[in-house]
Image: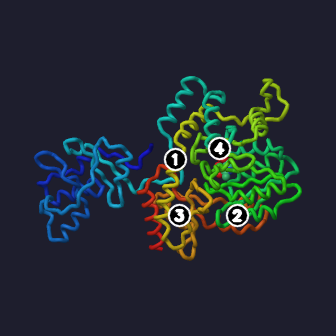
């Protein structure tokens, strides 16, 4: 796993002073190393005695010491050190607001390396969490030549993912978008049909409907969950409506019971777009397993990734069989190279699936880490006036695909856009919330959907990768508080 600190062994000589030297010497060293610290060593043995920070020097001068006073007279708090053999995780856990340099010692208490936490390290909104297993399985595909869509990892990934969702079938595909297209085609949706979709979503949800020749009908969101409003769905049903696609936006489930009830009453299919909600729970059941079919995305910024990739899950054998045929050029599975329906090449490769299997082996851990990071964020941001935390309905488990907040311009003192620009200067990336699809130039329906328009204009997604830790979340919250205060 990627660590957030760098090792800067080469700086050791630049910033080392012996306890016989003066404060002037220490200041020279601090100046040279540009890390705000010097390493104090025993003049006889070379054994490490502790860090001297520029703050320690400043306080000693204020107390009356002068530049020629011995450095050993400076009062210093205890230094946090680690063994040079400590793991990256252990070292990461030692950094804090005031601890930016950690000397790494050998058994004889000599400094053999330095761990440096650079507060200017760029924090992206999302980043894949890839490790040795991913490398091993992908390498195996390359070494064995199984690089295309035939190969053991494809079926293994499909089975693992279906089991994870609690569904009977998993059909992998080349992307979340193609999984959506396959789902709608399998359900027989086509020209003349209408499909109800939320406007507050990624464009694919609507595009997949258009690919089939049907028409997407945009509906507003519920302010409590940011997801499609069941009340608004019912108002949008017409004689042409064939399906509803609820999206579990940013990892929080849509309120499925009233949606399934409407679907039942009007005889509509339900395709859950769970592209952002791997492992999220609706009343204890996994998202993707509640409708007729569910789809997921494994794009690089998703909770687990296959680079590009998607999955369709269902309990319905007939739909699963149809989707498999459509995914594979419409080829008859019993009669190779016979094509009785118009199909597509939407297959996932063995290389992608190899990544997927490695990711599935620790999906629970990844999801858990996302939830833990959300708790850290909630604690750190909860008291700041003008910030609304992400939704968390009592019947849902949000997996916080992207940890997203709303900014009230009046009480926060600036817009979400301005906050984003100021965080960017601090090397903290953010992402605006989705522009409602009904306002996208290719759709532009001239509807007024107030909830999703409000969410879009006032929200912001913060760094949400599982690679970030409590210290980095602390740094982000600290910057947000500071920006608000200074404004
Ligand atoms: C809600 C939603 N639906 C569909 C997709 C499409 O997935 P993909 O990018 O894998 O095609 C995405 C993601 O990117 C998404 O966020």
Q: Quadrant of residue 224?
A: bottom right
The one of 189 and 418 positioned closer to us in this rendering: 189
Q: Name the front one of labels 3 and 2.
A: 2
Q: Name the front one of labels 3 and 1.
A: 1
Counting residues from the start of the chain, the first of labels 2 and 4 encountered is 4
Spot occupied by residue 355 in the image (x, y as percentages of width and height): 56, 36
Counting residues from the start of the chain, the first of labels 4 and 1 encountered is 4
The residue located at (58%, 53%) in the rendering is 401
Question: Residue 421 has which mark?
Answer: 3
Label 4 beta carbon less than 8 Å to ligand 1: no
Distance from disc 4 to disc 1, alpha carbons, whole Å, reads: 18 Å
Counting residues from the start of the chain, the first of labels 2 and 1 encountered is 2
Residue beneath label 1, please?
366
Residue beneath label 2, please?
221
Q: Name the front one of labels 4 and 3.
A: 4
The one of 288 and 89 positioned closer to us in this rendering: 288
Disc 1 element = helix
Q: Is residue 108 above or below residue 60?
A: above
Crowd band around label 4 with a 10 angstrom C-alpha radius: few (<14), some (14–19), many (20+): some
Spot occupied by residue 375 in the image (x, y as percentages of width and height): 49, 59
Q: Name the front one of labels 2 and 4.
A: 4
Distance from disc 3 to disc 1, alpha carbons, whole Å, reads: 29 Å
Are the two marked residues, 3 and 1, in contact with CB atoms closer than 8 angstroms? no
Residue placed furthest toward the front:
284
Counting residues from the start of the chain, the first of labels 3 and 1 encountered is 1
The one of 481 and 168 positioned closer to us in this rendering: 168
Question: Residue 166 has which mark?
Answer: 4
The residue located at (12%, 60%) in the rendering is 70
């Amino acid at each position: 796993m990627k660590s957030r600190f760098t090792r800067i062994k080469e700086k050791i000589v630049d910033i080392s002073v012996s306890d016989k030297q003066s404060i002037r010497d220490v200041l020279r060293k601090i100046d040279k190393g540009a890390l705000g610290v010097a390493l104090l060593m025993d003049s006889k043995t070379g054994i490490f005695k502790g860090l001297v920070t520029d703050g320690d020097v400043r306080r000693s001068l204020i107390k009356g010491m002068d530049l020629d006073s011995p450095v050993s007279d400076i009062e210093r708090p205890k230094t946090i050190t680690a063994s040079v053999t400590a793991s990256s995780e252990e070292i990461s856990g030692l950094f804090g607001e005031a601890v930016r340099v950690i000397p790494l010692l050998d058994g004889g208490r000599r400094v053999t390396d330095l761990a440096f936490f650079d507060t200017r390290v760029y924090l992206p909104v999302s980043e894949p969490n890839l490790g040795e297993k991913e490398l091993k399985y992908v390498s195996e595909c390359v070494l064995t030549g199984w690089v295309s869509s035939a190969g053991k990892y494809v079926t293994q990934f499909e089975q693992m993912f279906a089991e994870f969702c609690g569904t009977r079938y998993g059909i992998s595909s080349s992307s979340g978008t193609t999984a959506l297209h396959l789902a709608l085609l399998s359900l027989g949706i086509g020209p003349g049909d209408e499909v109800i979709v939320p406007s507050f979503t990624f464009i694919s949800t609507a595009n997949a409907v258009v690919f089939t020749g049907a028409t997407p009908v945009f509906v507003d969101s519920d302010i409590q969950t940011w997801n499609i409003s069941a009340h608004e769905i019912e108002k949008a049903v017409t004689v042409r409506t064939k399906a509803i696609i609820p999206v579990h936006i940013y990892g929080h489930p849509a309120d499925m019971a009233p949606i399934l009830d409407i679907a039942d009453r009007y005889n509509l299919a339900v395709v859950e777009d769970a592209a952002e909600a791997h492992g999220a729970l609706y009343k204890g059941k996994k998202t993707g397993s509640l409708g007729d079919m569910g789809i997921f995305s494994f794009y690089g910024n998703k909770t687990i990734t296959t680079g590009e990739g998607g999955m369709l899950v269902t309990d319905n054998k007939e739909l699963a069989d149809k989707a498999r045929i459509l995914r594979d050029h419409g080829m008859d599975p019993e009669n190779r190279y016979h094509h009785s329906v118009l199909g597509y090449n939407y297959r996932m490769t063995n290389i992608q699936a190899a990544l997927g299997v490695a990711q599935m082996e620790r999906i629970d851990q990844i999801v858990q880490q996302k939830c833990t990071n959300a708790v850290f964020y909630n604690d750190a941001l909860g008291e700041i006036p003008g910030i609304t935390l992400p939704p968390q309905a009592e019947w849902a488990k949000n997996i916080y695909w992207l940890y997203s907040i709303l900014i009230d311009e009046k009480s926060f003192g600036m817009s979400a856009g301005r906050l984003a620009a100021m965080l960017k200067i601090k090397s903290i990336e953010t992402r605006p919330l989705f522009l409602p699809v009904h306002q996208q130039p290719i759709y532009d329906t001239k509807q007024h959907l107030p909830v999703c328009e409000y969410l879009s204009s006032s929200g912001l997604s913060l760094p949400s990768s599982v690679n970030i830790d409590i210290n980095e979340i602390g740094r982000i919250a600290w910057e947000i508080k500071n920006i608000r205060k200074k404004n």
